[in-house]
Each structure stands twice: as structure tokens, then as C-alpha cells.
Amino acid sequence: MHNTVGDGATGVVLQAGTITGDVWITGPLPLTPSSVPRQLPPMPSHFTSRTGELAALDDISEQDEDTDGRPAIVVLIGPGGVGKTGLAVTWSGRHSDRYPDGQLYADLRGFSPEAAVVPDEVLGAFLRSLGVAPERVPVELVEQTVLFRTMTAGKRLLVVVDNALSVAQVRPLIPASGGCMVVVTSRLRLDGLGSDGARFVDVAPLSQPHAVELVVRTVGRSRVAGELAEVAELATLCGRLPIALRVAAARLASRPRWQVARVVAELSDERARLSRLSADGGTPVATTFDWSYQALPQTAASLYRLLSEFPGASFGVDVAVAAARLNEQTATDGLQVLVDASLLEEIDDDCFRFHDLVRLHGRAQRDDDRFEVVPRVATWLLHAMTRANMVVIPIRWRVSSVSEQYRDAPAAFGSGREALEWLDEQLPNALAVLEEAAARRHDDLAWQLCEALWELFLHRKHFPRWLRSHEIGIIAAQRCGNPVAESRLRCQLGRAYLDLGRFEVAERECTRALEMARAAGSRLNESVALDQLGTAAQGRGDVDAAVAFFSESLAMERELGIERGVAQRHRRIGEALVTAGRDDEATQHLELAREMFGGMGDEKDEAKVMVGLARLEARGGDIGSAFRRLDRARAVLAASGSVVYEADVLVGFADVAYCDDDVPAVREYLVEALQLYEQVGGPQVERVRARLDGLRAHGAESSEAPATE
């Protein structure tokens, strides 16, 4: 075997099957050691009482062996602010060792001001957490459900489903194994889950002694030793709800000179003159929130009002800076004031969220700038994402003009990998802001945000989010009367369908994009649409049509003076001709592409072309030259941070080894390539598996070489 093959990414393999687009995918799904999820939020401090409810959860979990192979399911029911989440997280944290295959958590936001989270979004996140490559997460909910049940069969997994609004939200999230436990919190009974074997536990406000104990533990026993009667009155004024008790106790704790009687007097006065915000059971909590809010310094109060308008589930300091137009230190200090007042939860480093009742209260406070929050944050995201994108793909034409502002600015990230990680972290909030911006008719921002998702989706896929976001973005571009933007977004959507192997749908989107580009006189969009139509034709096996599309696009790139585009089209034509066995023509195009990329200093794309040239050299009998070319390509592509690029080189090694009649080397190269491809998914996975199956079944008779990227 030529050269020593480096260690591949070895994973635990689970036989599974799922439908992705129009293709039934079978075979092993990769699960790496890092794929064991630990998603539980931190347990609340000073958790008090709930011994009865904790015992009920213990009892239900211990009966999982009597559930006929179904997971144990418990629904915690109670009014908002009663402590259901704290109870669920505390019990789960204390018993996480019973579930060695991981703990999954999702806030369904069923009672938040924004729309509740849809099940396919949660399942997609669960599947990715369990090790499924984003590219292999199915688009449709029914297919996601099948895959989730397949992957959880025989496992011991804990799933916490918070703030559920309906049975339909919860049922797809129930795993398949009797060794699993599902803890659901809701303000509604969700009786329909009874048919799934669910048990129901009512969570009432704390008893009076335990409500007093929570305040005492938070403030300090010595501080209130002489005012226990006043503490009892305070507990009553707070409705014995943990959320209100924590807010009141936090204010007391931050004012060591205050007596409890003063707090009781102020709260009593507020009750007399302020409206009440009721939790489900009619218990007033607005009084406590109003009282604590009115004590906030001006900056923290402004942050409270404005951030309550942010549509994402959680946020960091950067969002606060954008929403309130503050400097970073001032925003950080203001957020800490809100955390100290128990009006904001700090769930991780630089990650905060509101309880839904607190968020509602914040939105009830008057602020003339509240309607500016979404466009402010959308604008910040657009600029920050654009700067990250310029690191991932430095030379790329964009319809949005934002990138022009940063042409001469220093790079925002040290590497493309670092930029992609940041973009991935921002994706949930970017999608929430995109949807809210479109809903509020900030359409110009909405389509630009959608365009800015391209680099992340191209590398990490996230297909359900890709499809949904671009449907929104296309509508926004239509409402703006911007056919160039709409054409661009249809091309981006078409690429998603190409990657899914849904070539007819891709052709439909790209044909529409082509028509719009021609009508608008957008030659750049026209060229992109033609290029993708060529890829679709090649996917259908029509090499002549593919070459015709690529050639027409190449002529446009040359006319527009886009040297890199010309080189890319030569590469695509060459690779298409390779699949048709037209080696002499293919060599001409690939050599020209290699020279052009080399002249531009684009080592990565030059290395990709060298893989194709190595195959041609091996076919011509020059095995040594082919291996040397692949060695050079691998040195470059291995450093790119893309496992796909490195896997492509390994497949090239396998093809050259096949030409050298070295079947053991072919198998070894393909096995390592498969391990890398499985980390991201895509059609290459099935192609490599098919070749390995062919080697096992027929020796070396499987000679098909997969098309390169």
C-alpha cells in the first residue's frame, strides 16, 4: 500500500435506515464518543422541598422495566412559575448516571410570546446531538421520527421536554427504548399522552413552610432570624411561587440593610395599585416583577424591556449590545444586574434567557425603542455573519452590499473552521430573527440574512433549516420587488436539493432562477444557475447536457472577468468528462484549471483538481506520478479543516491503487474515506459503501469511481 494512511475518525456503528429526499439510505450511522449528549441546564440554587414530587419521579423511573418495552413518561403539570422546570432539571441532574447514553433537553416554548417550537426542529437538534451528520438529518418529521426511534432503540437515555403546549409537540420526541425516561413539563394536562403510558404529577405552589424556607436559604438564616413572621407574609404575597420568591429574595439579598418588613410594605402597596399578571391558577406574580423592575438602574431596566422583544430562546452579550446600542462592558454589567435580581437566568457562559412570564412582563413595560430591537439585531447579525462568511469563502459574489464595507478590514476570525463554528452557534438565533424580521415586514433585512446563511449551509447542511429559511427569504425578496435577490436565493435553495439528490426539484428552482436572472439582466446569477443545472444534469447521468451547461456558464464567467469562476467551470467540465471516459478532453480542462488556480495562489482548489488528474495518470499507467500528485494534494487538503476534502483524496488513492491491482490497499483507503465521509454525510457515503460491498461480493470487480466534488 502506498504511504501510511492516517488514523480515521472511528465511531460506534448502529445499523439504521431513513429516507432523505427521494433516496432510502441504509447502513451504519456514525456515533462518536463526543456524541453522548449532556444537555441538562444547571440545577437551580437553593432548591427546596418537592419531596413528594421527587419520590413520584423516583417511583416512575424505577418501574421502567414494567412498561412493555416503552419508555417511562411523566408529565409535570402546574401553573407558570411554580417550579416545574426546576423540579425536572433537579431530578434529572441527580439521576443522570442512570442514563449513560446521554441526556437531551428541549424548551418547546409552548407558553412564550413567540410561536412554539415545532417538533421537527427539536428532532433535528436531537439527531445531530446523537451524532447524525447535519447532511443526513431527514427533512420530513415522519422520517426524523423513524430515525430517532431507530437510534434510541436499546439505549438508556433521559429526555427532558420543557414547556410543552400539546401532545403533538411531545409525541415525536419519545424514544423507542424501555430503558429511556421522558420528563415533560406543561401548564396543560396533555391527557393524550396517557395512551403512551404517561403518568401525571401535579406541581402546586410550595407549602407555606417550604416557601419560607426558600427565602431563608436564599437570603441567609441569620439575616432574617428575627423576622420569620414577615418572611411568612412575604411568601404569601408572592403566592408561594418559586419564581416570585426568588425575585423578592434576590432583592433582599442585594440590600443587606433592608428589613423584610420594608419589602412586605412595598409589595403590599404595589398589590393595591398595580394590575396583576396571573399564572394559570390565578396567583398574582406581576406585583413581584413590578416591584423588582422599578428598583433596577436605568441601563438594566432598558435592557430588560428591550431584550424581552428578542425572538430567540437565549442570547449573549453581543445581542444585548446590538438591541440596546450599548458598549460591551455596559451591557455586561446590565445583564449581571438582571441576573442578580433573578429577572434573567444565566444558563451558561455568556448565555442568558428569560422565564416566559418574565419575558411577558418585560414586554408589558413601555419603551419607544422596542420595535427597533428586531431590525437592530438583524442588522448586527447580517454584518457579523458576513464578516465570518468572508473568512470561510473569501472570494464570493454576494447580492447584499454589506461585504463591500469590510473589503479592507482585517479578518474577523483566524480560520474558516473557527468562523464556521461561530456561524453554527448563531444559527438558532439567526433563524428566529429571520422569521421575526419577515413577519414584521423588514423584508430587505430578511432576504439578506437568508443569503448570509449560504456558507454555513454549504458546509454543515442543516437541510430542514436550509429549506425553511429559504422559503421565507424568497418571499421577502419577492415583497421587496428584488428579482436579483430572489434569483440568488433560488439558486441557494436549488443547491440544497442537489445535495439531497432531488435533481428534478433542483432543476425547477434553478430554471426559475435562470429565467429571473435573464429578465433582470443579472449575468452573475445566470451563470450560477447554469452551473447548477449542469450539476443536476450530471446527477441524472446526462454528461452531454452537463458539459453544455458548464460550458455556457464558463463563457459568461470569462466575459465577466471572473478568473476563479472560469477555473471552476473548467474543473467541472473535466470531472464530468472523466465520468464519461473522455480522458484526453478531461485532461485538457483539468490541467487548465490547475494552472489557473495555481496562478491565483488558490492551493485548495488546485489540490482538488490534482485528485482528478491523478486518476487520469493512473488510467494511463503512470501510477508513480499519480501517487506523488495525490501526496501533494493530501498535504494541502488535510490542512484545510474539511474531512470531505481529505476523504476525496483517499478515494483518489483508492482509484489509483485499483489501477495498480492492489485490492487490499483499495479496501483500506475506502474504509478510511468512509469513516471521514460519515462525519458529514452526503451521497459519497453511499457510493463508497457500494464500492466496499462490491469488493466483498465480487473481489475487485467494482470499478466505479465516484464523482468528485
Image (tube, grey):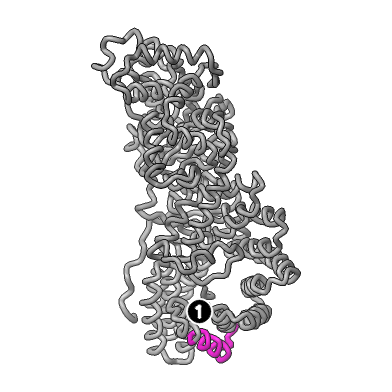
Figure quadrant of residue 373: top right
Q: Is residue 575 magenta?
A: no
Q: Is residue 540 visible?
A: no
Segment colored magenta: 578-595
Q: Residue furthest left?
A: 222
Circle 1 packing at 10 Å, graded few (<14), some (14-19), many (20+), is few
Question: Three-letter amino acid code at disc 1?
Answer: Ser
* Foreground residue among 368 and 155: 368
Q: Is residue 97 above or below residue 661?
A: above
Q: Is 563 situated above or below 22?
A: below
> In this rendering, would 638 be left or right of 550?
left
**Residue for point 67% across, 81% down:** 552
Q: Can you identify the residue that label 1 sits on?
A: 703
Q: Residue furthest top?
A: 229
Q: Residue placed at 32% from the left, 17% from the top?
A: 258
In the image, residue 339 sits, relative to residue 547, either above or below, namely above
SS at mark 1?
Answer: loop
Quadrant in the picture for residue 660: bottom left
User: Which residue lies most toward the right here?
Assistant: 519
At which x and y percent is residue 220?
27, 20
Judging depth in this view, the residue of 538 and 380 nearest the camera is 380
**Residue, x 48% and y 75% (percent of image)?**
698
Residue 268 visible:
yes
Provide residue 431's location: percent of width, then percent of height: 55, 49
Q: Residue at x 40, y 60 (%)?
A: 418
The residue nearer to you, when weighing 495 against 540, is 495
If the image is split into quadrants, where does the N terminus sit? bottom left
Q: Give the image location of residue 385, x and y in percent.
A: 50, 57
**Left or right of 515 in this view: 206:** left
Q: Nearer the viewer, residue 349 or 444?
A: 444
What is the total number of numbered labels drawn onto the structure image? 1
Give the main secondary structure, helix, strand or loop, of the magenta stretch: helix
